[in-house]
Image (cartoon, rainbow, N blue to C red):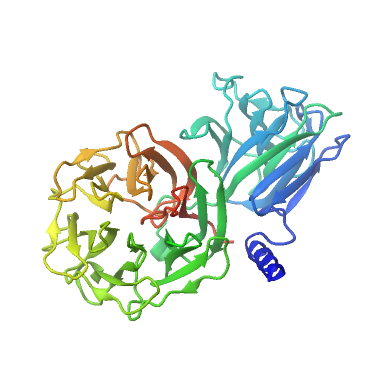
């Protein structure tokens, strides 16, 4: 039995990371002629890379380093966490992201670099055989020891951002490189800055995202590939457990802590947290489910939002059924209604809805036996609320609202009184989810340039975490996503992890 489980786990990992690759990368080699060889390893269980490399430098008119890379074309965003191992020999040892015209030692390239002494810089070679250049402003400072590096290609422009753990990404520099070809090499590198030395670094949370244009319309042009991820909110470690070119969204963590639940093409599926083949959950006649679904506090019932034909707003209606599957029971006759939270008594639900032909959304609660719904908000035109969810102790309902002029996190008492704003920043914050122990709020933050009443797909977003008792939010993940990433409660039962969906170009 043990051998069968080991073989099954290896099969699961192979489906995410092909056997002939090193993680998500297809190639690795020493660039130039370093005296000592480098290497690249991938720990598939931890989803962590180890790079070793030597080389005199990546500078002047030629380079020596070890490179782990793919061949990419078009626009892309490269993001990862970096850390050197050991004190090192030379403070100018380097690790980071590199985009390169070819594997020739003197070719055009651009690098997002973390040095051994903590100095963080953007460096590039404009023409083949020319001397290297670097960012020459005050951001090129020895004390700027960043761990998260992001290098984006947008047309012919390379953009370097970096962050300390827990902080938003900051712009370090940008450079237009007309001589970079359409198809480039892109990946991770390490250099010892000493031809006699081999240095080592660990790299994790490695993501290669291929974004779309701002005016991209998924309904017309197709949906991007999806990754189902888990994240330990206190260590920041992420794992991809499933990916597909088919659209899927909004995972819930199942009460046993061993499976996730998500929606795809109107159906619901479960999947082990180690990954594997999704298994369809029986939802009876309800086969047009959207991404608003969730599990009661006692783990016995599932609420879904299923679209009935020919009704206002697409006919989204709320139903309840046994968590193991069965025939759904209608809760809301009026449409559109979108479920978002269970009451801790397991007898009531809260949801957002439009009523009486109005375009304004408000928060309502109702018994799972149906009956007269109760409005908890009374918004004016132009105001919006969403993502309503009870705290485990039942004292508050948390939600996102735009009453202050931007989308922020709010809470109120269960009768709708005592509304108070929780976040105060330039981002547009959506979908607050309260940890089962009641200590933490996880939510998604859209950039300031997004229309504040909108939560579109395919944007550079952040997942953030803050204490329910108050305090500054910190960033726990940088990703490409948005709508469908974390619309519903997704905490693990032990309050240590969350699950979410990120997006990228098709595999």
Q: Quadrant of the N terminus?
A: bottom right
Position of 162 with respect to 50 (left or right) is: left
Q: Is residue 124 left or right of residue 464?
A: right
In x, y percent, where is residue 337?
Answer: 22, 64
Residue positioned most to the right: 35
Q: Is residue 61 above or below residue 258?
A: above
Q: Please determine whether, in this image, residue 297 is positioned above or below residue 324.
A: above
Q: Position of residue 387 (x, y in %)?
A: 29, 53
Query: Which one is nearer the viewer's eye here, 136 or 168?
Result: 168
Q: How many marks?
A: 0
The residue depicted at 79 percent of the width and 41 percent of the height is 104
Q: Where 379 sits versus 157, above or below?
A: below
Q: Picture quarter containing residue 133?
A: top right
Q: Is residue 75 visible?
A: no
Quadrant occupied by the C terminus: bottom right
Q: Give the image location of residue 253, x and y in percent.
A: 44, 59
**306 and 340: which one is in front?**
340
Q: Is residue 405 left or right of residue 233?
A: left
Residue nearer the viewer, 436 or 93 = 436
Between residues 165 and 348, which one lies in front from this camera angle? 348
Instruction: Report the residue at 64% width, 32% height from top.
Output: 113
Q: For residue 363, which quarter of the picture?
A: bottom left
Residue 123: horizontal and vertical position, in percent? Answer: 65, 30
Residue 493 lies left or right of residue 338; in this view the side is: right
Say above or below: 6 vs 59: below
Q: Is residue 273 visible?
A: yes
């Amino acid at each position: 039995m043990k051998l069968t489980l080991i073989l099954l786990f290896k099969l699961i990992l192979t489906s995410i990371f092909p056997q002939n690759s090193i993680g998500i990368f297809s190639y690795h080699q020493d660039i130039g002629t370093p005296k000592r060889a480098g290497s690249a390893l991938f720990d598939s269980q931890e989803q962590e890379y180890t790079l070793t490399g030597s080389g005199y430098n990546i500078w002047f008119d030629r380079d020596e380093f070890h490179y782990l890379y793919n061949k990419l074309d078009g626009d892309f965003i490269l993001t990862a966490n970096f850390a050197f191992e050991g004190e090192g020999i030379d403070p100018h040892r380097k690790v980071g992201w590199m985009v390169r015209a070819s594997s020739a030692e003197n070719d055009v390239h651009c690098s997002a670099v973390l040095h051994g002494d903590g100095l963080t810089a953007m460096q590039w070679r404009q023409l083949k055989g020319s001397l290297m250049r670097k960012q020459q402003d005050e951001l090129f400072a020895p004390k700027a020891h960043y761990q998260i590096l992001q290098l984006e290609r947008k047309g012919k422009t390379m953009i370097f951002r970096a962050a300390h753990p827990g902080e938003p990404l900051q712009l370090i520099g940008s450079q237009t490189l007309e001589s970079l070809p359409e198809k480039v090499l892109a990946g991770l590198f390490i250099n010892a800055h000493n031809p006699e030395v081999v240095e080592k670094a660990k790299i994790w949370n490695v993501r290669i995202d291929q974004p779309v244009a701002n005016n991209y319309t998924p309904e017309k042009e197709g949906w991007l590939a999806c990754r189902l991820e888990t994240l330990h909110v206190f260590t920041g470690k992420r794992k991809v457990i499933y990916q597909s070119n088919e659209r899927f969204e909004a995972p819930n963590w199942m009460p046993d802590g061993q499976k996730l639940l998500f929606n795809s093409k109107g159906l619901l599926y479960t999947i082990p947290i180690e990954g594997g083949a999704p298994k369809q959950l029986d939802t009876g006649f309800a086969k047009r489910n959207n991404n608003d679904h969730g599990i009661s506090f006692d783990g016995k019932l599932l609420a879904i939002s299923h679209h009935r034909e020919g009704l206002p707003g697409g006919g989204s209606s709320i139903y309840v059924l046994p968590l193991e599957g069965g025939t759904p029971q209608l809760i809301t006759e009026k449409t559109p209604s979108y479920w978002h939270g269970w009451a801790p008594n397991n007898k009531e639900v809260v949801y957002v809805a439009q009523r009486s032909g109005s375009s304004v959304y408000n928060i309502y609660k109702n018994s799972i036996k149906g009956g007269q719904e109760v409005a908890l908000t009374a918004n004016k035109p132009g105001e919006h609320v969403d993502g309503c969810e009870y705290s485990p102790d039942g004292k508050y309902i948390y939600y996102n609202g735009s009453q202050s002029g931007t989308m922020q996190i709010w809470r109120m008492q269960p009768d709708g009184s005592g509304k108070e704003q929780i976040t105060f920043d330039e981002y547009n914050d959506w979908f607050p989810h309260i940890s089962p122990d009641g200590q933490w709020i996880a939510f998604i933050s859209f950039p300031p340039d997004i229309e504040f009443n909108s939560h579109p797909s395919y944007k550079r977003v952040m997942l953030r975490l803050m204490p329910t008792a108050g305090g500054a939010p910190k960033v726990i993940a940088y990703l490409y996503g948005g709508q469908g990433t974390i619309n519903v409660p997704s905490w693990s039962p032990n309050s240590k992890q969350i699950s979410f969906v990120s997006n990228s170009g098709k595999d």
